[in-house]
Structure formats: C-alpha cells, structure tokens
Amino acid sequence: MKYAKILILAAFAGLMIYGSMGLPDRADPDNRMHQERSITDTVVAGSYFIREAYNDANTPNMVTVVLGDYRSIDTFGEQVVVFAAGLICLLILRKFRPV
Amino acid sequence: MREQFESPIVLLGARLLSPYIMLFGIYVIFHGHYSPGGGFQGGALLASSIILIRISGGRIISRLQIREFFTTPLAAIGVIVYFLAGFVAVLYGGYFLDYEALPFPGDLSPAELRYYGILVIEIGIGIAVMAILVMIYDHMARGEDYV
Amino acid sequence: MIWEVELVLFLFLILTAIVALEAKDLLIAVVTLTIFSFTMALMFTAMGGIDVGFTEAVIGAGVTGILFIVALYQTTIKTND
C-alpha cells in the first residue's frame, strides 16, 4: 500500500512537470496576457495596469495601486472575510470563566 | 513540557526586540507606496511584535500594553475606516471607493488624491489585521491565571 | 536568478515537506513547516513576486507558527499515526 502511495505521487509529479512545460516564459512581453485582444477577439486590459499605474495614482509600486485602487472592492471583501474569521474565533474559543 | 514558568532572559530579549519589529511594521505600512509591503504585511508585523510580548511575559505584563477587551473594537474601527473611505466618496458625488471625489484639503491633482486615498485604506487594513491576529491569539492561549 | 540556487531551494523544499509529514513529534513538524514557508518565500522572491514573498515570510513563517504552537500546547504533542 505504501508503494502504491509513492507511485501515485510520482505519477502526479510527472503530470505536473509535463503540464508546466507548456507555460510561457517569465517576463516575456509577447505573452498572451499582455496582448490587447484575447483569444476570442474581445478587447481586454492587456498591459494597461503596468503602463499607466504611475500616471494614475502617482505611486511607483504598481502592486499597491492594483490592490488599493483598481481592485479596491476586492480588497474590501478580503478585509470583511478576515474580520468574520476573527469574530468566529472569538465566538468559538471564548473562555467562560466561572466567576 | 506543559508547565509554565517565568524566564527573565526570554522576557529581556523580547523587550529588546519588540519595539524594533513594531517600528519596522509602521515603516512597511507607510512606505508601501515605494517599496514592497502594504497594510496586510505591516499589520502582521505589528501583531507579531505584540504577540512576542504576550508569549514571553504572560497576561499580567501584557495587560499593560493592550488590554484584551480592546482588540475587538480596534478591528471594527479598521474595517470602518476602509468603508468610510469609500462611502465619503459616494457622498461627494463619485463612485464607491473612487478616491478622486474625496475631500482632502488643499489643491491636489487626481493622481495625488488617489495617492492619499490608498494611504488611508492601507492604515485601515493595518489596524484591522493587527487587532484580529492579536484577538485570535488571546482567545486561543490560556494564561497563568486561567481558572 | 541563478538556476543552481533555485535547484538547491527546490531540493530543500521537498526535504522539509517530507520531514514535516513524517515527524512523530508535532513540535518538530511545526518548526519544519516554518522552514518550508521561509524557503517558499525565497522561491517567490526569486521568481519576482516580492510582495507575495514578503506576505509569505511574515504570515507563514511568523504568525502561523505561533498559532500552531499555541494549539499544540492546548492538545497533545505526540501524534498517534
């Protein structure tokens, strides 16, 4: 049974390595996600965020601009999720002191 | 392995190390526009500096820093700061979380308005994450005066 | 990034993952998982995602280890399987 486990893991690792051979190179400007048109020929954002992040928000770090400005409602939802997780920990793990 | 006892060496080391971690956390929050970092990372650094004092000193010493009942309102204040940054923009005639409509004083261009709007929400995220992580630790750990 | 350094990081990643899975003492497993998280942060930094690496180093190697150790002290140290 132990050899079957190792065999399944090795087969899965081989599958992942075979799948990762088809990925594009890192930081290649001709990649699919940097094109202005997608595969189905619709207009997408492309590399707009990389080009215009400094001009829109006067901030050199473009990750901060994407998280805080372009996708700020996403970050707000994440904040509410973290707050809900804290409240659930408070409700489940609260200590009941017999005073 | 489970009994707890005081160790002055550990407490001295934690007292030496904790203010520098806290200062680095504040630097990460306020310098997130120019270097890697932001509200989440800075809030986690602030929380780890507070949890370090709580682990090494116990609850009686750590009550002098931040009381237990004070963390839940602080987390709510962090989320409310983020929400108000979006809602004030709605009141002044913009979209939700549209920082160009925020009424900052002075004559600022739209790019600079977005700069200060991002700074306000990063501070809100930092306060909320710090308070929530300390709150989870407080309710998980049982200190020396647990009955 | 030099590819030899990435290869060494990959091997260290697999080694710490196997040790964290197979350790009988759960405290050893938590410490090894912390080393796994920090190696993962170095990998993210090598690939260019510096913000993700910073988050991984702070959360995975700092706060998660503390919370795991607190949970261990409320329950048992030794594993059963």
Image (cartoon, coloured by chain):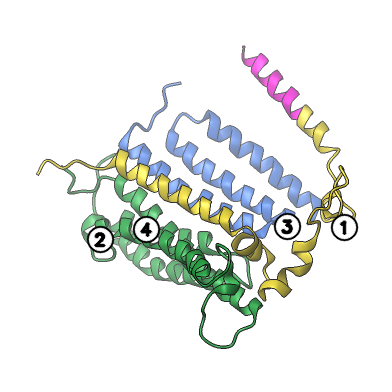
Residue marked by disc 3:
C48
| Chain of the residue under the numbered disc 1 shown in the image | A
Please give the label number shown on residue A51: none
Q: Which chain is yellow?
A: A
Kind of residue sitting beneath label 1: Pro
Residue marked by disc 1:
A29
Q: Secondary structure at mark 4?
A: helix
Mark 4, mark 1: which one is toward the viewer?
4
Q: Do tag 4 and tag 1 residues touch (Cβ < 8 Å)?
A: no
Residue marked by disc 2:
B67
Residue marked by disc 4:
B76
Q: Check if mark 1 and mark 2 are on a common chain.
A: no
Q: Secondary structure at mark 1?
A: loop
* Residue lying at 31% horizontally and 61% vertically, measured from the top left: B11
Disc 3/disc 4 C-alpha distance (Å): 34 Å
Q: Do tag 2 and tag 3 residues touch (Cβ < 8 Å)?
A: no
Q: Secondary structure at mark 3?
A: loop
Q: Mark 2 or 4 closer to N-term?
A: 2
Q: Residue furthest left?
A: A99
Mark 1, mark 2: which one is toward the viewer?
1
Q: Where's residue B129, x and y in %?
A: 44, 57
Nearer to me, C1 or B81: B81
Indicate yes or no whether the magenta region holds residue A66: no
| Chain of the residue under the numbered disc 4 shown in the image | B
Kind of residue sitting beneath label 2: Arg
| Chain of the residue under the numbered disc 3 shown in the image | C
Numbered range of the magenta stretch: A1-14
| Chain of the residue under the numbered disc 2 shown in the image | B
Disc 2/disc 3 C-alpha distance (Å): 40 Å
Kind of residue sitting beneath label 4: Ala
| Chain B representation colour | green
